[in-house]
Amino acid sequence: MMFERLSADARTVVIHAQQHARRLGVRYIGCDHLLLALAATDTPAGGVLREQGVTPERVEEQVVRSSGLGAAAALFADLDRDALAGIGIDLDAVRARIEASMPLESLARAGQAVQCGSHRARAHRLRLLRRWRRRRRAGRGLAESTETRTTPPPATGRYRAPGPPPDGHLPFTPGAKRVLEMSVREAAVRHDRHLGVEHIALSLLATAGGPVPPILNALATSPAQLRAAIVDRYRLAS
Amino acid sequence: MLTVMQSTVQLAEGAAGQDPDVGLRAVAALRTLTERLELLQVGNARKLGWSWQQIADRLGVSKQTVHRKYGRRIGRR
């Protein structure tokens, strides 16, 4: 598994991304949660992000603004808000009205049905379950290999979704999964033997689609600019 | 829901506009939005004890259709 190859700092980023996702009340770990965790790390990559104005507080503000908090987030997060705006539908207005009028439980259940309903998500859960069973048979659970080996301080933030946070291991979105996979390539290109925070950061910033570019644009910077800054920082360091 | 209805005129403009790229994306996004709202409303109606028949009447489809689409996803009340 991917996780085994990560450096201690990089593991912390992934674990924190999961904690952020939980705190914000969603049942998946997305690229936005990875960015949030990266911006908070005490590493050169995290330092570069913060110097360029990508602080955890500002990222969180954008994440909550773009995909909402908690249950309704899943209902509306992946909709094409620009296309809807083009035909005069303000997705935020729809969401605000729905959130105000619908009981929280209905929102949570519908949000869950959206996430569970996607064929991809279901296949992914099944894979995770099989992997977990395999590991348990081999005498060690997934939980041990991830969370109890190192216990970094928990990730914190300003917002918290109402209701109980989602439990269990949260799956990565396909985009976030690809970011982790591509970080291996970033390390290989740089002839680095370890797989660290900077490789996750570079891989995340190289991703064209997904939630990260709009967040960075809103913070008056760009993936390319940050990528260059991070590459510079590590070139100087090595 | 109101917002959706109010913007029917603008919808017609977007969905019937010149540029197919804009128009088609708008239609696709609107369809997804409708599906999400339907899921939410059907789930809420079931929780409030509505029968499949009652829900189907409002949606203008047969009760078998609603049940087939949502029975498993929403589960029993």
Image (cartoon, rainbow, N blue to C red):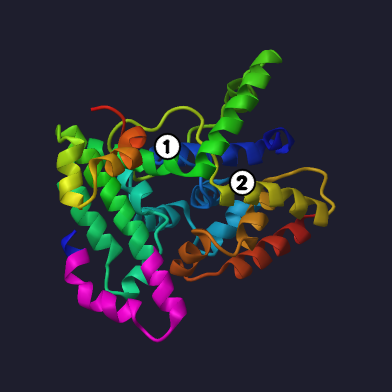
* Residue drawn at x 65%, y 39% as measured from the top left: A9
Does residue A71 appear left or right of residue B44 in this picture?
right
Task: Provide the residue span drawn in magenta.
Answer: B4-28
Residue under pointer 1: A22
- Quadrant of image for the C terminus of chain A: bottom right
For the image, the number of numbered tags is: 2
Q: Is residue A233 visible?
A: yes
Q: Which mark is residue A177?
A: 2
Residue at coordinates 23% horizontally, 27% vertically from top-left? B77
Decide: is A217 above or below A173. Answer: below
Where, by quadrant of the figure, is residue A92 drawn? bottom left
Give me the C-alpha separation between circle 2 and circle 1. 17 Å
Mark 1 residue type: Arg
A48 left or right, relative to B65: right
| Magenta-drawn stretch contains B38 | no
Q: Tell me if A20 is positioned left or right of A177 in this view.
A: left
Foreground of the two, A237 or B1: B1
SS for dot 2 = helix
**What is the x, y in percent for residue A190?**
81, 56
**Could you say whether the residue bearing mark 1 is in a helix, strand or loop?**
helix
Q: Same chain for the residues at labels 2 and 1, yes or no?
A: yes
